[in-house]
Amino acid sequence: MTKAQLENALRNKFLAFVSDTISQEMETDVLPVSASELAIPCLDEEGNEKFVLIKVSIPRGTRNGQGGYDPYDGYYLAEQYAQELKDKADYKAQKNAEKQAKIARDEKKRAEKKALAEANKNLKELRKIKVTPEAE
């Protein structure tokens, strides 16, 4: 068998497995829409009809500049993706910590400003009090 025939056989095997599994488990139609794609009709939370599209592909890899391909490495790409998700989560956590720190600083400033305004108000009240000497 040629390389293309081997890839087609593998793709068809997975398409058949996915199609059979989904149609049995979810009791829905699985509609082939191309040689490598399946459309699955379903309903969203509000009852609107939507489609889930599943594509099965056998990647060649990346071009190497010499008329060929460097092999596709799913393990490496999975590690890269996991690292990317971790970096995004770390960045989000850092931004959230910075936001919380800013909120705390702002609340502290507001509390200080309120305390100062209250102290000034009390000082004004004290200044209004007239002290008269008592007669002996």
Image: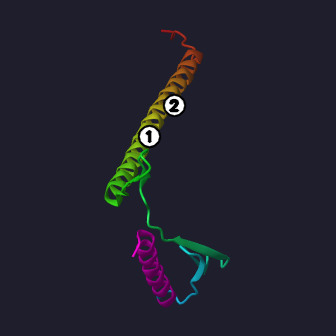
In three-dimensional space, the C-alpha distance between marks 2 and 1, rounded to whole angstroms, equals 22 Å
Q: Tell which of 108 and 54 is nearer to you.
A: 54
User: Pointer 1: residues within 10 angstroms few (<14), some, or many (20+)?
Assistant: few
Relative image position of residue 112 (x, y in whole percent): 47, 27
Q: Tell which of 132 and 33 is nearer to you.
A: 33
Predominant secondary structure, magenta span: helix
Q: Is residue 7 left or right of residue 55?
A: left
Q: Is residue 61 left or right of residue 50?
A: left
Residue 108, relative to residue 127: is it above or below?
A: below
- Visual colour scheme: rainbow
Quadrant (top left, top right, bottom left, bottom right) of the N terminus: bottom left
Q: Residue furthest right?
A: 48
Q: Is residue 15 magenta?
A: yes
Q: Is residue 60 magenta?
A: no
Q: Earlier in the sequence, mark 2 or mark 1?
A: 1
Residue 54, relative to residue 77: is it above or below?
A: below
Residue at 47% across, 68% down: 57
Relative image position of residue 22 (x, y in whole percent): 49, 84
Q: Which residue is mark 2?
A: 110
Magenta residues (range):
1-24
Helix, strand or loop status at disc 1? helix
